[in-house]
Amino acid sequence: MSSGTEHILKALDGLYPRPDPTIKQNVEEMNFSIGFIGSLKMLIASFKAANEKFAAPDQMTPEQLDLLIEISYMNAGRLEVQKLQNAIIQLSEKATNNELFMSLD
């Protein structure tokens, strides 16, 4: 996903007249959300990997792991996913409405 936003930023830099600066800012903010989601994915994988290092009686049950993942996702991940979706929708709407460029009015 990060490489996708890099391509979008590069394409926006190639536009003339220059694109509206808020559009580039929104795309750059998408990278923060993408990074956060990637970190959350690694955190979830680390829960499972750490659990595998314990003997069976000391491991968290699958239900406990699922609950931990659900709480992590619900509290933080959902907000970042929503921000990412909103940024993509806004960019798409501006492109559809031919509003990618700065207004000189």
Image (tube, rainbow, N blue to C red):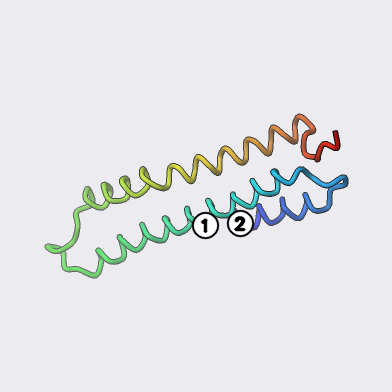
- Residue at the top extreme? 97
Nearer to the camera, 16 or 7: 16
Locate residue 103, reporting x and y percent.
82, 36
- Residue at the right extreme? 16
Q: Residue at x 18, y 61 (%)?
A: 59
- Residue at the left extreme? 57
Residue 88 position (above or below residue 65): above
Q: Residue at x 61, y 41 (%)?
A: 87
Locate residue 54, reporting x and y percent.
19, 68
Q: Residue at x 75, y 36 (%)?
A: 95
Q: Secondary structure at mark 1?
A: helix
Q: Quadrant of the C terminus?
A: top right
Nearer to the camera, 64 or 36: 36
Q: Amino acid at mark 2?
A: Ser
Q: Is residue 63 left or right of residue 44?
A: left
Q: Badge 2 is on which residue?
A: 2
Locate residue 41, reporting x and y percent.
42, 56
Locate residue 75, reporting x and y percent.
36, 45
Q: Amino acid at mark 1?
A: Gly
Q: Residue at x 37, y 60 (%)?
A: 45
Q: Badge 1 is on which residue?
A: 35
3D distance between C-alphas at marks 2 and 1: 8 Å
Q: Are marks 2 and 1 in contact (CB under 8 Å)?
A: yes
Q: Is residue 74 left or right of residue 15?
A: left
How dense is the environment of label 2, judged by Cα within 10 Å: few (below 14), some, or many (20 and up)?
A: some
Q: Secondary structure at mark 2?
A: helix
